[in-house]
């Protein structure tokens, strides 16, 4: 089972790693990867050219914003009511159920998120949470309302916004929608494993985040949304902090024609127990997929360097700096 809305990966300078593309290939999820023209030959050497969409511009110095808006218009031009836009540094997708984070082997989870989103007339942004922010041994709700949606986003095409600025584009889009009374849904029943911002070469790492990019990023959001944003210093770096409690009054509005089922719909998903050898093969394949990943270390004032890693060996990202 695959998503009914078009899936776009926005990518730059990552044809060798292409983590999200590899994940979708293994899952059998149809997608298009959107790239700049000067990189076409590199991507076409490793990805079916039929899956490549080439932008009509390059190196604008505005991060991924122009590409994201081009994707939005492209999805409208093909008659889609919504579209998925996905970062290019996601290595795995999971279903979180009964305190197990289970890797998925198909696009069914996207169908689940689409169907839930379309139960309501006022959910305009939705998507899966980061796996690293959902502790396995804690009780978690299946979703959280009215917060930032990031990295893998289902967008309703008819909302009166477009991507803007250079930094924090996902947070800015989420806040604008929430300020206007819409709802957002971030799913904890479905998760992604994403490489943290500024830890992979390519993308926006060199273009936007070099030098004092962290501070510029925080100041940008503060300028856009001063009533809900503060700037703090955490983990030896500048961070923005958003107070999402302002949007608690945004309530879900169910479609009048929605018929609630009297039993759980698992969409045909089944838990498959892997043998030890199969599990090892899966683990080794993931290691091969990220073999070219070299974390960017950060140098401190005392000359030392560090690279934060989680207990599963993957570099950690900062938790969503928010109050909800």
Image (cartoon, rainbow, N blue to C red):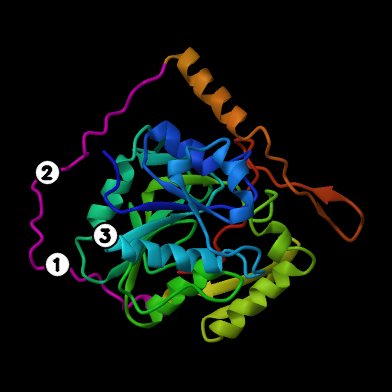
Along the line of sight, the residue nearer the viewer: 225 or 289 = 289
Task: Where is residue 237? Give x, y as percent.
Answer: 74, 64
Instruction: Please state if 227 lies on the left or on the right of 4 as rendered.
Output: right
Badge 2 vs badge 3, beta-carbon distance below 8 Å: no
Q: Which mark is residue 117?
A: 3
The range drawn in magenta is 246-274
Count of all numbered marks drawn on residues in the image: 3
Q: What is the CA distance from the residue labelled 1 to the residue labelled 2?
A: 19 Å
Packing grade of label 3 (10 A; few <14, some 14-19, many >=20) is: many
> Which of pointers 2 and 3 lies earlier in the amino acid sequence?
3
Q: Quadrant of the C terminus?
A: bottom left
Task: Where is residue 179? Give x, y as percent.
Answer: 40, 82
Packing grade of label 2 (10 A; few <14, some 14-19, many >=20) is: few
> Which of pointers 3 and 1 lies earlier in the amino acid sequence?
3
Q: Which mark is residue 255?
A: 1
In the displayed structure, 24 sits above or below 288; it is below
What secondary structure is marked by label 1?
Answer: loop
């Amino acid at each position: 089972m695959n998503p009914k809305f078009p899936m776009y990966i926005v990518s730059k300078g990552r044809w060798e790693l292409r983590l999200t593309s590899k994940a979708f290939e293994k899952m059998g999820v149809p997608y298009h990867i959107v790239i700049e023209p000067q990189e076409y030959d590199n991507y076409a050497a490793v990805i079916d050219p039929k899956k490549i969409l080439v932008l009509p511009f390059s190196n604008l110095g505005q991060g991924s914003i122009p590409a994201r808006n081009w994707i939005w218009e492209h999805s409208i031009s093909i008659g889609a009511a919504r579209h998925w836009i996905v970062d290019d540094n996601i290595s795995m997708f999971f279903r979180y159920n009964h305190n197990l984070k289970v890797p998925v082997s198909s696009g069914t989870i996207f169908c689940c998120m689409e169907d839930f989103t379309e139960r309501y007339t006022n959910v305009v942004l939705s998507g899966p949470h980061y796996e690293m922010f959902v502790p396995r041994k804690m009780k978690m709700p299946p979703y959280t309302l009215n917060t930032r949606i990031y990295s893998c986003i289902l967008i309703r095409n008819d909302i009166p916004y477009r991507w803007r600025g250079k930094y924090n584009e996902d947070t800015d889009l989420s806040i604008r929608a929430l300020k206007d009374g819409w709802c957002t849904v971030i799913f904890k029943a479905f998760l992604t494993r994403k490489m943290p911002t500024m830890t992979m070469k390519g993308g926006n790492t060199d273009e936007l985040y070099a030098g004092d990019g962290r501070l510029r990023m925080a100041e940008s959001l503060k300028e856009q949304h001063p009533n809900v944003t503060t700037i703090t210093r955490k983990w030896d770096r500048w961070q923005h902090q958003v107070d999402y409690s302002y949007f608690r009054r945004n309530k879900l509005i169910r479609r009048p024609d929605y018929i609630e089922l009297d039993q759980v719909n698992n969409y045909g998903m089944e838990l498959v127990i892997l043998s030890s050898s199969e599990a090892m093969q899966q683990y080794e394949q993931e290691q091969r997929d990220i073999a070219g990943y070299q974390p960017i270390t950060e140098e401190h004032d005392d000359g030392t360097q560090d690279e934060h890693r989680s207990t599963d060996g993957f570099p950690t990202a900062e938790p969503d700096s928010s109050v909800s």
